[in-house]
Amino acid sequence: WLLARRHVMTGSKIAGLSGNGYNDAPTLLKHMLWPSTHSVNEMFTSYGNRHEATCELELIKYLRARVDDPHDDLVSFEIEHPGLIKDIGCFGYSPDGHVVETYKDGTTAVYLSEYKCPFGKRKIDPGPAHRGLDIYSETSGKPTLYGPIVLPLPRKVGKTPQPLVTRVSGGRAPSLPITAYYYDQVQWGMALGQRQQLLRPRPGEAMKCYFVVWTPKYS
């Protein structure tokens, strides 16, 4: 898997081009051309890999609850694991999952899913009052494990942040419980997945990603 990703612009690298990554663009290019110059702390990656299936179970529980809800028009779902997706040139992406959804009216959709099991947040416990509740509501006031960030994100050109041109509904910038780094990652994954015709939104709706964050005491 690591060998297949060599010299490929994957989701974990794309933020470096926008100024939201851990490295700037020249350093990112050096790491892509000469992978031996880039070291990864295996403590963090092995922790995430070890708990990824548990993180996916949280998404499955959420989707099953939707299926069981008579007011929700989701009737079934399945999660696929397509592996490394290759696009033109050096473009690529390794999605954690693709969620295939079927609705009461017979329409279907395939959405991206991304799982995060942050080693640095493994001891976080927001308290039993919040545990198991929806942490993604920007109006609930409940704690989030990442973010929030406010769209549109600034884009760094040299040392000067420049605003990105995005559509904002209702004249109010939306906030999301995600980091700018991961926001760039999932945007890249949704774009490439649709280019390869592996992802497709429900007719009349926008593409989306199930961004799932898991810790031992909170998800």
Image: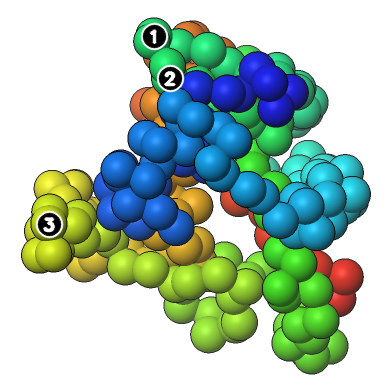
SS assignment at label 2: loop
| Whether label 2 touches label 3, CB < 8 Å | no
Quarter of the picture holding the C terminus: bottom right
Q: How crowded is mark 1: few (under 14 residues within 10 Å), some or many (20 or more)?
A: few
Q: Give the residue at x 12% y 54%.
A: 157
The residue drawn where x is 71% and y is 56% is 41
Q: Name the residue under label 2.
A: 91
> Viewer-proximal residue, 144 or 27?
27
Instruction: Work out how far the residue at label 2 is from the one at label 1, CA to CA, in angstroms.
Output: 6 Å
- 201 left or right of 163 in image: right
Q: Which residue: 71% across, 64% down?
A: 118
Whole-Å distance between the Cαs marked 3 and 1?
Answer: 27 Å
Instruction: Name the spot of residue 60 as percent of width and height, x first.
Output: 82, 43
Closer to the camera in the image, 47 or 116: 47
Residue 187 appears in the picture as rendered: no
Q: In this view, does 123 lie above or below 171?
A: below
Type of residue at label 3?
Gly
Check disc 1 and report the residue beneath it.
88
Under mark 1, the amino acid is: Ile
Question: In which quarter of the view is residue 110 placed?
Answer: top right
Q: Residues within 10 Å of mark 2 (few under 14, many from 20)?
A: some
Contact between labelled residues 1 and 2, with CB atoms less than 8 Å apart: yes
Q: Which mark is residue 68?
A: none
Compared with 72, 207 (above or below) is above
- Coloring basis for residues: rainbow
Q: Which mark is residue 158?
A: 3
Q: Is 137 on the left-hand or right-hand side of 49?
A: left
As measured in the structure, the alpha-carbon distance from the residue carrying label 2 to the one carrying label 3 is: 24 Å
Residue type at mark 2 is Phe
Residue 106 locus on image (x, y percent) = 62, 16
